[in-house]
Each structure stands twice: as structure tokens, then as C-alpha cells.
Image (cartoon, rainbow, N blue to C red):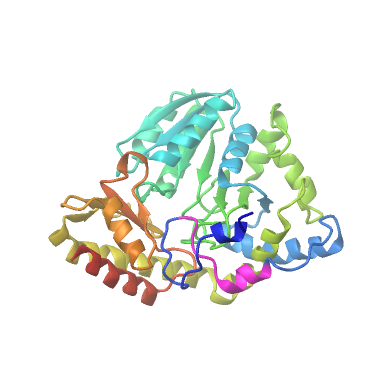
């Protein structure tokens, strides 16, 4: 019988994996996952979750609890809908993942209308206000940093538009935010900006293995959840809150991933959340500058417009003789990993995920290798 271990991908040198999720995980964080299993209802588990709590709140920029779920971020997207949409939501769509958020609303039995802009563009806050002022919606879904296009929606202005619509209509409108490639890569102010639910996944800017999701809910969100039936069991925020008070999870957690979270929380605390955000912006600006200065000779251009670019993932348009897929294959042959375009953009773009624990020096080495591939 064939040894199944032979089918695993080969180990690669750290610092050469720039996929826009899952991101590369530091060896010390991976090593933490080899700790022995413990009882997940015991004091040891509570101590671990109590220890990571301050770092999670600092990442989400909130004084409220940050719940830990053993799922992908899509799980908490569904949880946001089940706990936060009463009847009808306005979905802001500008890429593949905002489409997913929109579709989840209908899948959960709620009505949904779409405000869609072309891929590569951001939503206009004034248009959000115009659509909401009719009083037909009780929630808005939005993806802050659209991983498929590298577009950063103007979340602070969108949040202000939602609040203005609330004042005009007298109706409560909850703002449900996918922060999958923004939380941990920039300062996303859950409390100051008035976000009712903010979620992310472990495998993006937090640089953890896939399999955990994190969410912070406003008091408004929790009050809404208490009035809704059909919250389900796995992502019932009322249950999450009750167990959080004992620093526990409602269901059996992915214990080895919790060990990794504890190790990475120490590393994030040592670097500092603000310094981590600055490092991400520095890498983003370095990438944008390279594309603007060097890219035109190969038909490369930035897909997202100025002022609307994500600090964690850059989508690069390809208008030359080589497709984005071929460019990524050329990098793979040299020991580097990039992201191909997503969905409809597969061949016409490629993506650099400059997030997690990557450094500017590693990014510079990547860009030098990319020039060799491009010739």
C-alpha cells in the first residue's frame, strides 16, 4: 500500500508564499499545534481563551467580546445573517465574496436586494444612503476588502450613510461586515465606526492555519438576535455569548488551532497591532509603486483605483502576451507562490497577498523574481 505521506506537498522555504489566503504560517505557530490534547471544558482551555481575548479585542478595535468559532469565515457570514437580518437586507456586491454574502441572505430565507458595481470599483456611500432611505431594509451586508479584486470599500463612509438612513427612516439598520482581508492587516475600528457585526477568518492577515473564524457583535446586534427565531445552533450568537462569559466555546473547538492562536496572539502582541497595520500598508504601497513604475512594460496595471486599494492583497491586471495563470506558473517554477485571478478574472489578473507575517524584504525579493519571470 502506498504511504499516504508521499502525497503531501513538499516543504518550501518560509517567506516565499504570497497567496492571498491561506497565508503563510510561521514555524513557531505551526509547532504550537503539536501540543497534547486537553479537555476543552476544563480550566486549561478557559485560561487559553482568556489569554487571547485582549489581543483579539485589540485587532477588532472593540471593548466587546470577540467570539471564536471553529469554521471558515463563511460560517460566521451565515451567522451574521441568521442573527442580524430580520426580513430584508441590502447587499453591496463588487466581487466574488460579496456575492457569497448576498447569496447567504437568500439561502437563510430572508429577502435581499443588490447594489452592485463592476468588479474593480467601490460602492458610493451616497448611493447606499439613497437606497436605504426608503425604509425597506433592516440590514446591510458589505465586504470591506474584496479579496477577488483587491478593492477596499469606504467602510467608514458607508457606516455613516447607514446611520443617516436610520435617522431619516426611524428604522434600525444593522451593518454586517466581512473583514476577512482587512482585520489584522489594517486598523478596522469595529466600535468607533459603529459596525454591528465584524468577522474575519484565521487564514488571512492573522496568519494562522485555516479553520477558525472570529466575530465581534454590537449590543444592537445581540438585541436583534434575541428577537429572531431560526438562528440555528452552530452560529447562535446568544449561545456564543453565554459560553464566552466562561471563556469557553459552545461546541467542541478545533483545539490544535486554538494552540496556534495562542502562539500567534503572543507574536501579534509583541509586534503591536498598530505596527502590524503599518507594515501591511508599507508592503501594499511598495507593491503599488512597483506596478505603476515597472508594470507597464509588461502590460501590467493596478486593478483597483487609487484610494480604494486593499492593504493586504493587490490584484494586478494583465494586458500583455502572458496570462495571469502563466505568470503564476512561472513563479511556482522558481519556488514562489502567487494567487491567480479569481473566477471571471482568472487569466486577466493575478494577485499578491502581502499580508500576515511577511516583511518588506521578502516582498522585494518576490518582486525581483517576478521581473525575471516577466523577462
Tell me if 11 is positioned left or right of 150 in this view: right
Tell me where residue 236 sits by quadrant. top right
Tell me if 258 is positioned left or right of 16 in this view: right
Please report the residue visible at 31 percent of the width from the left and 43 percent of the height from the top.
345
Range of the magenta residues? 21-32
> Does 152 sit above or below residue 173?
below
Tell me where residue 370 sits by quadrant. bottom left
Tell me where residue 329 sits by quadrant. bottom left
Tell me if 346 is positioned left or right of 92 in this view: left
Please report the residue visible at 54 percent of the width from the left and 73 percent of the height from the top.
272
Q: Residue furthest front?
A: 1
| Residue 89: x %, y % from top left | 51, 29
The quarter of the image holding the N terminus is bottom right
Please report the residue visible at 58 percent of the width from the left and 59 percent of the height from the top.
209
Tell me if 237 is positioned left or right of 172 in this view: right
| Residue 374: x %, y % from top left | 21, 63
Asked if residue 27 is among those painted magenta in the image, a careful observer would answer: yes
| Residue 66: x %, y % from top left | 65, 54
> Does 329 sit above or below residue 107?
below
Q: Which residue lies furthest to the right in this view?
A: 42
| Residue 304 visible somewhere in the drawing | no
| Residue 104 visible somewhere in the drawing | yes
The quarter of the image holding the C terminus is bottom left
Amino acid at each position: 500500500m502506498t504511504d499516504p505521506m508521499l502525497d503531501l506537498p513538499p516543504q518550501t522555504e518560509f517567506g516565499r508564499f504570497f497567496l492571498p489566503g491561506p497565508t503563510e504560517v510561521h514555524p513557531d505557530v505551526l509547532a504550537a499545534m503539536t501540543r497534547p490534547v486537553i479537555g476543552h471544558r476544563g480550566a486549561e482551555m478557559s485560561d487559553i481563551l482568556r489569554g487571547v481575548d485582549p489581543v483579539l479585542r485589540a485587532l477588532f478595535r472593540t471593548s466587546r467580546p470577540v467570539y471564536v468559532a471553529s469554521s471558515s469565515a463563511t460560517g460566521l457570514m451565515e451567522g451574521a445573517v441568521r442573527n442580524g437580518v430580520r426580513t430584508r437586507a441590502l447587499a453591496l456586491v463588487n466581487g466574488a465574496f460579496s456575492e457569497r454574502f448576498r447569496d447567504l441572505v437568500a439561502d437563510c430565507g430572508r429577502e435581499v436586494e443588490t447594489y452592485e458595481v463592476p468588479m474593480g470599483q467601490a460602492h458610493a456611500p451616497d448611493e447606499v444612503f439613497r437606497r436605504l432611505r426608503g425604509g425597506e431594509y433592516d440590514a446591510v451586508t458589505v465586504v470591506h476588502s474584496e479579496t477577488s479584486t483587491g478593492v477596499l470599500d469606504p467602510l467608514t463612509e458607508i457606516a455613516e450613510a447607514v446611520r443617516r438612513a436610520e435617522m431619516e427612516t426611524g428604522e434600525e439598520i444593522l451593518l454586517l461586515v466581512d473583514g476577512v482581508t482587512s482585520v489584522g492587516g489594517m486598523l478596522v475600528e469595529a466600535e468607533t465606526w459603529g459596525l454591528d457585526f465584524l468577522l474575519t477568518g484565521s487564514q488571512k492577515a492573522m496568519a494562522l492555519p485555516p479553520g477558525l473564524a472570529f466575530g465581534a457583535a454590537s449590543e444592537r446586534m445581540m438585541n436583534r438576535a434575541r428577537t429572531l427565531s431560526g438562528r440555528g445552533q452552530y452560529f447562535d450568537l446568544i449561545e456564543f455569548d453565554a459560553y464566552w462569559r466562561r471563556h469557553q466555546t459552545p461546541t467542541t473547538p478545533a483545539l490544535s488551532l486554538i494552540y496556534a492562536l495562542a502562539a500567534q496572539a503572543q507574536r501579534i502582541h509583541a509586534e503591536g497591532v498598530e505596527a502590524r497595520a503599518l507594515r501591511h500598508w508599507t508592503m501594499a504601497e511598495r507593491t503599488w509603486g512597483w506596478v505603476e513604475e515597472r508594470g507597464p512594460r509588461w502590460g501590467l496595471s493596478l486593478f483597483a483605483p487609487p484610494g480604494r486599494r486593499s492593504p493586504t492583497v493587490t490584484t494586478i491586471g494583465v494586458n500583455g502576451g502572458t496570462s495571469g495563470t502563466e505568470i503564476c506558473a512561472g513563479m511556482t517554477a522558481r519556488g514562489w507562490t502567487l494567487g491567480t485571478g479569481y473566477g471571471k478574472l482568472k487569466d486577466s489578473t493575478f494577485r499578491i497577498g502581502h499580508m500576515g507575517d511577511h516583511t518588506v524584504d521578502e516582498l522585494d525579493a518576490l518582486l525581483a523574481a517576478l521581473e525575471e519571470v516577466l523577462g
